[in-house]
Amino acid sequence: MSQTVKVHFFGEFRLESGTASLNEERIHSKKVMKLMAYLLLNHDRMISAEELGELIWGNGGSSNPMGALKNLVYRVRSVLKQLGSEEYIVSGTGTYGWNHDIELRSDMSEFKYYAEQTRERSKDINEQIRKYEQAVACYEKPQTSVLTSDSWMSVRYTYHHSVYMKLVNELCELYSSIHAYDKIQNVCGYAMSCDELNEDTHYWLIKSWVGQGNIENALKQYDTAMKILYERLGMHRSQRMRELYDEILGMSKDIAQATMDDIYGEIQEEDPNGVFFCEYTVFREIYRLEVRRVLRSGIAEFMILLTVVIDEKRMQTEPTRIQYYRKKAIDKLQLTLWRHLRMGDVAARYSDEQYVVMLPYCSYEAAQKVIQRITVNFNKIMGNNRIQIKAETREVSIHNELPLERKGGTEWIHEKKK
């Protein structure tokens, strides 16, 4: 073979020969790049002109598809001349394909090869880790919108991305078994830049800080993960994330020798002003504590559920716009609670459209005044009379148990204690 060409589908689309390189900027044509990528991806076969014509123009996209295809193939050949003088694209009877006399190497093929190697288990854990490291090193997040916008390529990208994330998860498990927490952070750092919505990556980053005994960074990473996963996907904590959170809370430098100063240093809040925001699962525990306080003191406490209500008929806009207003409204509601609730009040996000608030040492009449204060100020900062807040009031009571957290907006019905 006279020459070897390496094609990169991951990262920036580009081709490299021994003496030259060709990237998206130098190709300078979406159609040329699309046809070139398809021929490279299917380099092991000759492709019919009909298949290529449908790829580029679809049905009825050109009055003379065969003539237009010949012209486009000519342009592809001309662009490839920047790599060398070889005839890279050959033609047959109504077919086109890559010249098999020129060796073609692909990062996708290399990734597939090394990924398959990880399936062959080794008794030596370091050798097994080496296999995984070779595989994940082949992957980069695709950066070209020209190729990712076409289904024939986006399907492949999606598949390879899922394989990559699976390999990262398995590699982190191997790293964890030998306590290589710094390596977990390195591999997850890049994986997070490729996909920040993958729970496995968040889990292992938190786990790496736990393994190093760094409670502060573990909690910071946990809070980041919960914020991203809830706001972007509407996901609440999985069971293993709950267990990891409990593990973080149970960590201690040395319980047997801890002093009061050590304990205060860990639990003290820097700026304890305003309403206390927390996760709903924490809110449930606070609720159970307040039930006991009410039983002992006899002083009533109340809770309110605040729901964003959008008059979609009056808004007269498309669903995506409604979703935008819904997110904007829940953010404005959070801001209102932060500004207009007292220190000692507790608030938690209950669903995509709701906040639940606990008002300690508060009568029913006072709770109604709080609701009025919240709704008036929400309306001011929202500035849209088609978006309102619905409020429901319940007494903190041993006879009622809070329901489980939910994703969508819902009526708030207490679960009765048996």
Image (cartoon, rainbow, N blue to C red):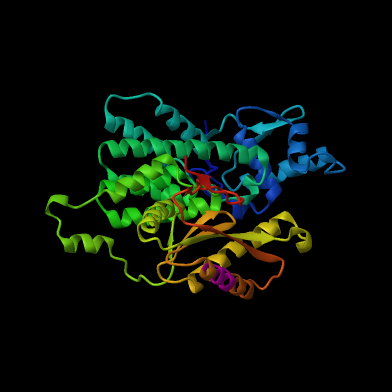
Residue shown at the point (49%, 35%) measured from the top left: 163
- The foreground one among 248 and 224 is 248
Q: Is residue 98 magenta?
A: no
- Residue that appears at 56% across and 66% down: 333
- Residue extending furthest toward the front: 298
Bounds of the magenta segment: 367-374
Question: Horizontal and vertical percent for residue 182?
Answer: 29, 48
> Image check: 260 left or right of 41?
left
Q: Quadrant of residue 353?
A: bottom right
How far across and how far down the image is residue 86, in percent? 60, 39
In the picture, measured across the screen, residue 261 lies left or right of residue 285, that is: left
- Up the image or down, 17 lies above or below 102; here it is below
Query: Residue sitting at 52 percent across and 40 percent down?
Result: 161
**Which sits in the foreground, 103 or 338?**
338
Judge whether 3 appears above or below 244 on screen: above
Quadrant of residue 262 within the rendered picture = bottom left
Between 388 and 120, the one nearer to me in the picture: 388
